[in-house]
Amino acid sequence: MVWEVVIGLEIHTQLATESKIFSGASTRYGAPPNSQACLVDLGYPGVLPVLNEKAVEMAIKFGLATGCEIAQRSVFARKNYFYPDLPKGYQISQYELPIVHGGHLDIVLESGDVKTIGITRAHLEEDAGKSLHEDFDNQSGIDLNRAGTPLLEIVSEPDLRSAAEAGVYMRKVHSLVRYLGISDGNMQEGSFRCDANVSVRQKGEPKLGTRTELKNLNSFRFVEKAIEIEIERQIDVIEDGGKIVQETRLYDSDKNETRSMRGKEEANDYRYFPDPDLLPVVVSDKAIEKLRSDLPELPDAKRSRFESDFGLSSYDAGVLTAQLDTANYFEATVAAAGDAPPKLIANWVQGELAAALNQDNLDITDAKIPAAELALLTDRIQDGTLSGKLAKEVFEAIWDGEDSVDAVIEARGLKQISDSGAIEKLVSDVLEQNPEQVQQFKDGNEKVIGFFVGRVMQASQGKANPKQVNQILREKLNE
Amino acid sequence: MHDKTLAQLSDDLAARRVSSVELTEHYLQRIDQHDKELNSFITITRESALEQAAAADKRIKAGETSPLTGIPIAHKDIFCTDNVKTTCGSKMLDNFVSPYDATVVARLAEAGAVMLGKTNMDEFAMGSSNETSYYGVVRNPWDKEKVPGGSSGGSAAAVAARIACAATGTDTGGSIRQPAALSGITGFKPTYGRVSRYGMIAFASSLDQAGTLTQTAEDGAILLQAMAGDDERDSTALPDPVPDYGAAMRSPWEKISIGVPENFFDDGLDDASAVAIREGLAIFEKLGATIKDVRLEHIHLSVPVYYVVAPAEASSNLARFDGVRFGHRAEDVDDLTEFYMRTRGEGFGSEVKRRILTGTYVLSAGYFDAYYLQAQKVRQLISDDFERAFSDVDVLVGPTTPTPAFGIGQKMDDPIQMYLNDIYTIGANLAGLPGVSIPCGFSGGLPVGMQLVGKQLNEAELFKAAYYFQQETDWHEQVPAGYE
């Protein structure tokens, strides 16, 4: 039986406003519990929400970047349920009239094909607080610092057909919100998290299968793994003659399994209705056009530009533009470089630099080599001062805290010998010392040339320009 | 002193014929004397009142006075008052000391008003008789076996008995105008959004509006002047500038056109009240107003619409009273569900529970369209009716309530009868319009109120009509026996 997988994602991204969506309290992460919850966040009697316009602007930017229709009038609604970390007994969200809807986002699949994923809607809402069940003897603690933090919930169409596609899509959305500057996308801090709706059906079946919702997947890897394991589970259930129950399931990353949280029969009736404390959000065309003109260059446009301006392959351009910080670093390096071609710089950013960042678990913004130094390093390769091998040594030295490319070259005497006179001298010495091998060459053994190159490089302590060594050797041997 | 109006006392204070401390002491003494019987106050803030009075006297001495500087007033206990118990008439908040001032409270304090205390009210403003209060019934100064009306019953009784010079109230379906009518005073509900709701414990957010309970329209104008205006803390507060109500009120009378909703004079209206209102209309006619019959086609639906919309919003607004952060909390619970059930079961009274249940029901999946959405549509029709009427007339005049004050306990077992008491007042809330009830006579020895409803944001015109009426009549000067 051939199974088709159908996945839709709901991504909750925390908007990078300084204050909360309905109060003036700070959204800064990591403050002592309840130190950033004002009376509005605490849901005290008599307090009222006042909308943070910055959150609206950020949501509209997302809408514009994904071809959504921007609602001229959107409405906040109350989603009513009881939970101790939900101070008002309702969450202010958008229900029937979201701020943006009906957009799309292109993703590049592993095959290189481009696939368009529909974006059903994105709506604004406030986050709840946090319940802390450990640390308290037989009691729970409530931290309301997060209560009222602005979230944009981005709902995709069920257009994704594999766990891998879901991962690519999630990465793309992550990249986009960072490009737009509307979220820091920090997953450890919960600024970017995802629920996945997953179902399977037989290939060719027009009707969707019963779906389950996987909750709170807070890393790209977990999204992929959770969906994979859930697909397997669903297929097993059906193939064993069972039925999928519509329910919410939690992914346990330790056990790599999903398990039921609550069934549909226990589902809350949220009793949504328009929040009478807030006016409808009315956005003028003028305001939308202003936000549109303020949009930064987005990933797809940047990728095309990298291909055309820098002569990079589509693949290289894709990798370099996936993260805004990487693209910025690359562009800064290109701008600072003299003769080094962008392709050489691209190789270094994707090669040495990426490896070093990975090893030290650093973001590119914290790279221990500034863009200007990497530019210099590639220039020195380009002008023949450094061989590739020596350049790596210089890179490592800078990474480990040394000052500048030129200083390292100078201090360690790493400068490549490109003076043909000096190399001729080294070559002559080596040939003189090894008459036997010279004779072998003359007898037609071409391979022996490697031996001579090795000796010359050894004699130069690796600093001789290998290209020149090769050339001069051949000239001399053929004399 | 207490026989004087706010406006007169204001002049006396400014002319330093009396000090605010003397005045405040006098009212506090009257509260001590009369309130055991009336039960109109939940909290008396004696010490802070005297401190505020002393501060007011200093301001007056320094020449920086406003008409309210040094005037002793009372706040309905629905307004949050910094460092003072704020109960909303509920056991749920019996232990709640607010950490902040409502905008209304802050603005009146800023104007120099002295707070005597917090007045009794129906629990969470849900009631028309002040009988649902956790703190007991309030007695009507005109007849202590009768209710003072509600929900601002404490404020109405206190002003009627002259134990407070003036008081604040809130009006969701008539909670200022109805008790004002039943207690023989002037009760003013402004346009929805004219006064900030910040710090006013929410009952039904799309209907709630703060206003005044005073002896006269002139006093109401002075009080509202200080309360009204935009507030960055309330998104629904109206940004329109606040006109000078006093100046507008005293400006020369111009011919106005008064509409009388004919369906307000149907069988439900007490005969003697009808006579009093007709006589009141005759006064306006004498003043040179033209009187016209108007028809509010859907007004008979206002009570059912109200009892869908208000409970729906209330069921959500009251969800925050869960015992987690403030207020009553049940002891010895085994799990979260029991914690919620017992906390709310113990903390809320039966009328509040009835409305939460009603509201939860009308918002539930499968019922939402039939009740909540339908009610919103009819609400719009009622609004449209008013708009149509106001294309032809300047002010609508009719009764405030179907009957004068009824007996304590008389309607408690029959919620529908109780709800029908607000049949004439609810329309103005649904349409967000300003309304005022002024005394216009007596029925069986009990005061009768006449209601004036005005156009959106046309408070000034209402004040003016009421003011001119009170220049021609002395119903508002009548004081219940024993409180002269």
Image: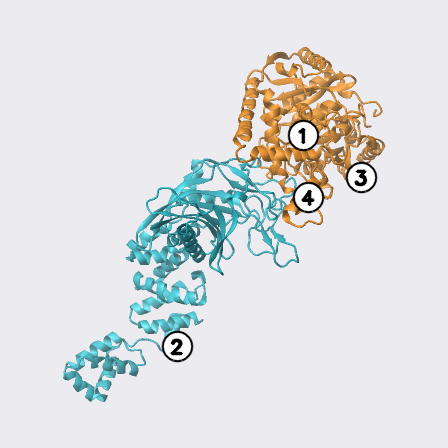
Mark 3 sits on what residue? B46
Residue holding disc 4 = B342
Residue mark closest to the camera, 2 vs 3? 3
Q: Is residue B218 visible?
A: no
Q: Earlier in the sequence, mark 3 or mark 4?
A: 3
Circle 4 residues within 10 Å: few <14, some 14–19, many ≥20: some
**Visual hue assigned to chain A:** cyan
Disc 1 sits on a residue from what chain? B
Position of the C terminus of chain A by quadrant:
bottom left
Callout 1: helix, strand or loop?
strand
> Which mark is drawn over residue B211?
1
Q: Are marks 2 and 1 on the same chain?
A: no
Mark 3 is surrounded, within 10 Å at the Cα level, by few (under 14), some (14 to 19) or many (20 or more) other residues, namely some
Residue A27 left/right relative to A159: right
Query: Up-down: is B108 above or below A176?
Result: above
The amino acid pointed to by label 4 is Arg
Amino acid type indicated by mark 3: Arg
3D distance between C-alphas at marks 2 and 3: 84 Å
Front label number (4 vs 2): 4
The location of residue A181, given as percent across then percent down, is 45, 50
Q: Amino acid at mark 2?
A: Ala
